[in-house]
Amino acid sequence: MKLTKNPAPEPAPVAPSGGHVPESQRKIGDYARDYVDGIKGGELGSLPIFIGMLIICIVFQSQNDQFLTSGNFVNLILQSAAFMTIGMGVVWVLLLGEIDLSIGYVSGVAGVITAILLTPDGNTSPTAVAIVIAILSGTAIGTFHGILFTKIGIPSFVVTLAGLLAWNGVVLLLIGSRGTVTLQDDFTIGLANDFLSPELAWLGVVAAAGIYAGAQLNEVRVRRAAGLGHEPMLLVGLRIGALTLALAAVVAIANDDRGIPWVFVLVGALLLFWTYILKRTKFGRYVFAVGGNVEAARRAGINVDRIRISVFAIASTMAAIGGIILASRLRSVDTNAGGGSILLYSIAAPVIGGTSLFGGRGTIKSAILGAIVIASIDNGLGLLGLGSGEKFVITGGVLLLAVTVDSLSRRKQTASGRA
Amino acid sequence: MSTTPLLQLRGVSKHFGAVQVLQQVDFHVSAGEVMALVGDNGAGKSTLIKCIAGIHQIDGGEIVFDGKPVTMSGPKDSADLGIEVVYQDLALADNLDVVQNMFLGREELGSRRQLNEPLMEARAKKTLSDLSVTTIKSVRQTVAGLSGGQRQSVAVAKAVMWNSRLVILDEPTAALGVAQTRQVLDLVKRLGEQGLAVVLISHNLHDIFEVADSVTVLRLGQNVAEYRVADTTSQEVVQAITAGSMTSVPGLKKELS
């Protein structure tokens, strides 16, 4: 019985020595045991992703030895960057337990605005101005959706479903009779087509590892100063080492081919930024609270409407940035901008990565992990010469599997009192 | 009580439309006193505490806090005075941990407007240990994993952390088992011992006779009796709840006058 894990009624007020190890004396073995207990209790974390990626790599590599090559690795980064970016915005909406179906075409609108503003036709905007206008139009669209949702009370599903249709229309109107607008700006094209020099990439690894180590050690220092228990140094060291190794491996593999694309740096920066906002600021805490229990949030004096509107604004802003990345990779936008699999892949990414569809649980990095899985499947099936039909069926199956894992782990968490 | 009450309600009335919910109610509670508020369903207990908490505004009478008449125009006014209410549904977010719940809406910020987690964790731990709550293993576990008694303890700790002077508990033991009820009643007793004024709403006379100093009985929107717990019996209280004499019977007013 799973329930035995949670010794039912507390054995009346006991002396502080209740059998558990005090936080300050916990050894690395205790953390390992906690992790295993967590998995048994349904807190799977990133485990399904790693198992999934292992299976994907073995299957595709056995079918086509082009899959695990440095060239394909760089392709994978380029193909998944837009989904990662848009997905990071979707995480926020999912945390509230809501949905945004419009992000695909919102990304299309932003891509088209960028391309049109940068067309050399006599009144070309400076690059920065064009990009800022495109991103801010995303913010404005999201704010508009948020206001319709909160102030009028239309369900987010309906607001953004209408948005899906309307913004698709706006893409068509903006492109008009041109059919295709070519992106003619070196900076914007370079985003997804230029690469860091090998030296610069290595410098980046050193800097990232240094910052991460500094932040982790500072955390330990602050907690120790406050007289609180902290993780054993061995565990902290292992984590810093693992991150450094992973980054070094990415850079080494990429440098073997064209190198690290600039868009990888952009996605990394966005990941750090949003993770900081979600984990370390009041705003992030309030988003979790609204997603977990609206009534509790309201009674705590949180302005629920403001949080909701901001979250929809974030989702559309990130969609706009993703749209610019997509336009950059394709070097043009056409009447299909923002269509196809963008919407579903971007929503599927965080869900596959472990963010709950039911609200209140999730991480920004889930969008990155999930996008890697989706892009790998897409890429691998492409290498096998299979068409969109097979791709969609298989990706759909993976999404279903991810949601099943979410639902089952949630049920298990409820049973073991961890929900 | 010889000391002046911390909170005093004099002749408070409240109606919703044509329904007179509270009629000339007097109520008081002093620092260090556990005052029980009892009454049958619909007696006006909830309305009374919502008036004290500033959720409803009173139509007549006055509220005196700390010797000064006050007006409550919103929940913030009562919170500013140091009045905290622990509602029956507790209003905890299951996905947040104990510290996050205790500080929800009042987070401490450190440098660069960052959440000051170590400070909050230390304060949460101190508050829980001051209340002798020893059943919560880790303040970093999510509230979803806690038992009913533990959740109640967290909600109470959350309420008393803010230098509050009056804590109102709405049926804190209603959904709890024997051991957990024990745990919460001990907690209520300690609140009184620490000098807070406590208002305890309960249907369970056994609980009340165990922890309360006094008991106020409401019946159909009027207070019909007030007893020192030491000087009364549960039979007397039950009688007051069900058949206490009222100054006027609602609806019968005209005939009587």
Image (tube, coloured by chain):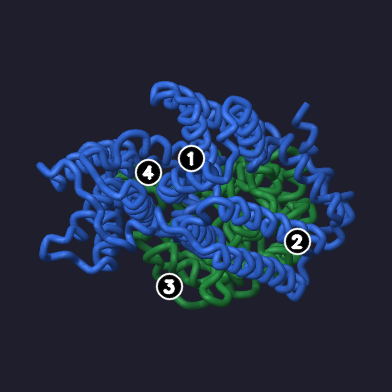
Chain colours: A blue, B green
Q: Residue at x 61, y 31 (%)?
A: A61
Task: Report which residue position mark 1 lands on.
Answer: A349
Q: Is residue B239 left or right of residue A327?
A: right
Residue at 78%, 64% in the rendered image: A229
Distance from disc 2 to disc 1, alpha carbons, whole Å, reads 28 Å
Give the secondary structure at mark 2.
Answer: helix
Give, as a three-letter code, the residue at label 2.
Answer: Val
Q: Is residue B248 left or right of residue A357?
A: left
Question: Circle 4 marks a residue in which chain?
Answer: B
The residue carrying pointer 1 sits among few (fewer than 14), some (14 to 19) or many (20 or more) residues within 10 Å by Cα, namely many
> Disc 3 marks which residue?
B70
Amino acid type, label 3: Val
The quarter of the picture where residue A220 lies is bottom right
Nearer to us: label 4 or label 1: 1
In the rendered image, which residue does mark 4 sit on? B250
The chain holding disc 3 is: B
